[in-house]
Amino acid sequence: MQPGCHDFPANVQRALVDDDLQAALARTGAGFPKKRLEGIATLPEFDLLRDQATAIRDHVLEHLDWYLERFADQVEALGGTVHWCADADEARDAVLRICKEADAHTVTKGKSMIGEEIAINDHLEAHGITPVETDLGEYIIQLRGETPSHIVAPALHVSRPQVSAAFREHHTGLDRDRPLETPRELLSEARQVLRESFLAADVGITGANMLVAETGTTIIVTNEGNGDLTQTLPRVHVVLASIEKVAPTLEDATTLLRVLARSITGQEQTVYNTFSTGPRRPDDPDGPEAFHVVLLDNGRSRLLGTPAQPILRCIRCGACLGHCPVYGQIGGHAYGWVYSGPMGAALTPGLLGLPEAWHLPQASTLCGRCEAVCPVRIPIPDVLRHWRTESWRQGQPGGPPRRALRAWAWLTRRPRLYHLLSGLSARLLRWRAGSTGTLRRLPGLAGWCATRDLPAPEGKTFLAQWRAQEHDK
Amino acid sequence: MNGRAQVLAAIRHGLGRDALDGDQATPLAARLATPTPNRLPAASRGDRMTLLRRFADKMRRVDATLATVTDFAAVPNAVAERFPETGSARVAPHPDLAPLDWGAVGLQATFGPARGDDPLGVSRAHAGVAESGTLVLCSGPNSPTSLNFLPDRHVVALHADEVVGAYETVWQGLREGATVDGFMPRTVNWITGPSRTADIEQTLYLGIHGPRQLHVLLVGPDLSDLVDGNG
């Protein structure tokens, strides 16, 4: 996927005036926070399990090389194949090679953020292979030629009439006058159309929520069952996974699963949690004959040992997106790449570099709701601050904001001058506001003032008032 | 340098160390050799009837239905009662299910993995987990995975003695049955309710790719007071 993070300010402008998107965001609103609260109410031990989940993820990252080798050894001992890929190009080529060796024409896909990261659909299409997304949300956006706007709910921005329109446009073999408005009608049609793809596919590609070092198992978590049909019916199962996804044991994976779904949909467990270990056994009546795991680094190893390392704990629940006031205003596409919301703002600069993604960590009030709801307690505001510091070192932001911040820094290191100037400007602003109490225009801030008024200061600074009160005592 | 060496070298560079030596790896190897459960929720504990009640209650909350039968011989009749309009069933080739008299209740039964158009599938679960009302199904000669996902309606038979409190009990049980190929079957499915999606305007609807209905038949001689007549 071609990144558009550098266009973030323009993306935001567009998002804020996009009526369809704003309606979708309003519809979602407090839905996820409410579901999460209901979900964690079923588990009194939730906070303790979050601590354990955090410790598991930290332990894995500190010993990532060792656990990955154990995972790969186990996969291979069972007749599976592991493809180690340093970057997106290598991963794309590995998947294409597998598909060509299998003489594949149609490929079904379960939902995979790594698939988005390496733009596998484009690559397969360019080589004459038809990829079909099977998660309903992913399928909808594939028909619409879009990318996911949420890591868990990829079609969050799409309305029901838009789904209907996309189906009518692409499902050309069906009766033109069929009713296709209600969710039931839409679901039945998607089920019917995608069923043909499931049965026809030569290769099934899924993501992996986790990898288990103990057994060489890959885990997917879905509510629809599409991932299971994707990986059970075709001859070949390809798993796309990033290197940080390992859990040491099945018990550790189980602890992570107890906090994963609760954090986003409030479910105690997602409907289908599926543990896949190697290809089908000789006497199995179904299942894939070949099992491939494509392991992708793509910049993650560069985050190890840096202040951004904790973002690699992420288990992709999506809780931080649903609780973020910024995401709630602009949706996912504005972030310009695969990952959006707070976890996207913390991860993307590490994978794409700050020249592309420096805007994203700036777009936060650092209110901390993301950290408060994270099941693995990632200090996302700290990571964002780390990226801000780094990008300042690299020269961003530049221009007037940089000069203003420089001037501010210079001033705050001279307290006497600072107090003198802040006292003067408080009185000046008070005087300018006159009887209205607000300032409608400020020199050099025409843009800001176009939609806002500044409430005028009281006329005295906080410290001046404090001193006066102390004096009165 | 091959891909594996390259990725591992990048990780070690980030972590600022070489590959772990024997002494450093010993505790990690021990963690894998003798896996220990982390904190088990209180909801995973209780005596037999408490766990069975919780299992039944949690299943209903995730929109599955549940009925009890005294033995496996009663399964075909229970299937026909729950889905009277269904004439045929694709049944797992399991010794508890395959020899039963399906024809006697008017069901045309065939055995094996699912095909694309089966209206009804019948599987035999490996275990049930009371904590969340979750079924555990393991792939194997008697248990085709496709049966869990392709048919419109899915019936799962399970003996009450196979209901445990926590998922961890299931893992430990599988480990104890290890063979030369390890202990994990190709596929272990945790199933908690029928298929669903919220991808259309974030509103939850049941029945997308997997079964639209999930019905559990709990087998045991002493379960009559478990279900208050709602099936």
Image (cartoon, rainbow, N blue to C red):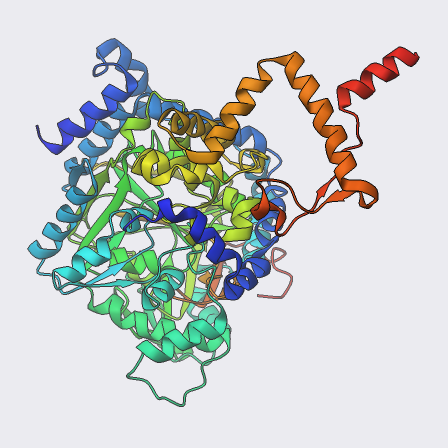
Which of A8/A159 is in front?
A8
**Residue at left offset 60%, top offset 47%:** A33
Check the image and report above or below for A378 versus A89: above
Q: Position of residue A323 (x, y in %)?
A: 57, 44
The residue lying at 61 percent from left, 59 percent from top is: B227
- Between B115 and A49, the residue placed more toward the observer is A49
Residue A238: x and y in percent read 21, 50
On screen, A66 above or below A24? above
Residue B150: where, in percent of width, then height? 33, 66
Q: Residue at x 42, y 78 (%)?
A: B86
**B210 or A389: nearer the viewer:** A389
Residue drawn at (63%, 42%) of the image: A41
Q: Is residue B13 left or right of residue A406?
A: left
**The C terminus of chain A lies in quadrant:** top right
Up/down of B123 relative to B117, above or below: above
Above or below for B70 versus A95? below
